[in-house]
Amino acid sequence: MRKTAPFSLIFLAATALLFVVQAFPLTGMFALLIAAPYWSIFLVNVAMLGTLVEALTGRVARHWLVLPFVFYGGYYLVAVQDHLALFALAQQFGAANASVSVPFDPLRQTIIFEGDTDDTEAAKLTQNYGLPVAFSANANVPEQYLSHRLMDMAICYKARENPAFGAASIQVRAVYDADDSPAPRADKRLCELSMPEKPLLSLVLLARSEVKMREGRLAFTRITWTIRTPGKRFQLVGGYGSPLSWVPMPVIGCGIDFQASRWSCFGEFLRERPKAIGSEVRRGQDYSALAGPLGLKRIATADRHSGDAEFVLGKMDELEHGTLSQQLANVDAMIADPSAKTIDRRVEMVGNNKKELDSRAAGILTALERAVLVDGRGRNRAKANGLVLARLLASLPREHFLQFGPRLLRIYAGADGQHWLWEAGPLIGRLGDLGTSALPYLVNPRALAEPSGRAGVEGMCRVGAAGRDTAGPALIALWNASPNGFDIDTANSMYVAMRRIGIDPPPFVGSAHARFAALQTDWADISPNSPPRVCATRAERIARSEERRDGRRLTNLE
């Protein structure tokens, strides 16, 4: 006996019921945990295919065939239109780009990526298309530009090992094989080195812009590269779009609309990952559509070669000395007047230069003592400068830092609960090197609060087992205040601190148990005999990574 309605429609009813559950925020939040909006992909397709089978086998009347035919027929009509639109755009863009040829000579001209681009785009041309050097605009450096070159690994190690180069905005990145392997390997011969530098040759300016458009039902992003040479202007077009997939995947559900700050419901078909229109591909990938009109040809990994080492090393030394001079001037200005209006407070290179830092240490401490007393109109400037001065003091070698111990403790003894000194996280952490006399300030709730980065934890860790009776209860109380665990940095810091003062951290409960197991594995070697440097857990993790990669640590040496 024929049924009046297909049994398979029960799956559509289940889809509707699941939608109702999601429509209310209280139950919808739990539904999100089990990815409820995606269940409709299975439920709707089973309902349609089941109805088709039931109608074809005679279980229900043949007119039920209309339902799956309308669903799949309408869907594939739109999907085909999407893919045809993508193909038509590729033909259109390809024809427009075919006639573009930019006169470019890398020996006489320099390519500069400007505007809405990132420096990986400049790096791609030097890595994969044999360009000796490319530039990207960067307003954060005095030169206004960063250069990008391939360099021998020896120079890469030199730049990476010296923190002063990082302070001078000299950066090193790994370079990967130029082939199209899904898992490219790092090139062991070369790296990509970027540094502030003004171009000296004639400029070829490249700017990238994007605009969202529609072609029929297909939404896509049109990319326009504008290339400007002296007296001429060229344009290349491309883009990417996401057509409907060839398998219908309806997603029906509700969730948080963060832009509108409300709970909202939705229903849509999932689309394919963005596909390139023509040979134009998105950032970080192939740049043949851009390189071709410039006369650049893709090269194999084996054909890559390093830039001019003598020139680059000379430029690196010049940048190092110039940046150090500027930062020393910044520090001297703060020492002279802690409440002065300072435009540039970058002092990282001074903090890494033992000779210059030691020679100014007494002046820096005196300036900090003056800064903490400033009130009224100059207080905000004194705070900004004072936090910089405090960070420099925290960079002092242990022996020199200990000499200033009594004066530093007097400064904190005079700071009330609202003083900005409690935001000087690096200095608070180093107070632990002064021993148990620093504990009253390290267990202060302000030293364990977010504005300081909970730096009191590192300080108690540095005190070590001698401070166990005072630090132990404070650490346990803070740890138990969040039994499900902290963010990874705080969890690392607290776990190491408890281990180094000689107590066992209580395990996390519930789903955070796995995170606790990871802490036990990562810091299994920590004990009261561990050196104080392990207390700076973020720096220690980096140093241990360096040991695994290079066989020795380059940072966090003391």
Image: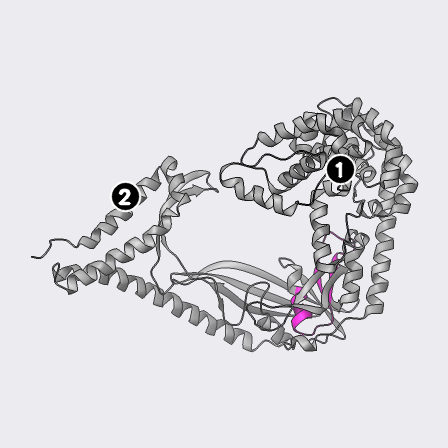
Question: Residue 184 sits in which quadrant?
Answer: bottom right
Q: Residue at x 91, y 35 (%)?
A: 362
Does the magenta segment cover residue 131? Answer: yes
Q: Residue at x 86, y 27 (%)?
A: 406
Question: Residue 448 sits in which quadrant?
Answer: top right
Question: Disc 2 designates what residue?
Answer: 17
Q: Nearer the viewer, residue 400 or 18?
A: 400
Total numbered labels? 2
10 Å crowding of disc 2: few (<14), some (14-19), many (20+): few
Q: CA distance from mark 1 to mark 2?
A: 55 Å
* Secondary structure beneath label 2: helix
Does the magenta segment cover residue 88? Answer: no
Left-right relation of 396 to 544: right
Q: The magenta stretch spans which residues?
A: 122-149
Q: Residue at x 49, y 64 (%)?
A: 240
Q: Does residue 380 appear in the picture of this structure?
A: no
* Secondary structure beneath label 1: helix
10 Å crowding of disc 1: few (<14), some (14-19), many (20+): many
* Amino acid on which the number 1 mark rests in the picture: Pro
- Of the 4 image quadrants, the one containing the C terminus is top right
Q: Nearer the viewer, residue 327 or 451?
A: 451
Question: Disc 1 designates what residue?
Answer: 426
Left-right relation of 523 to 556: left
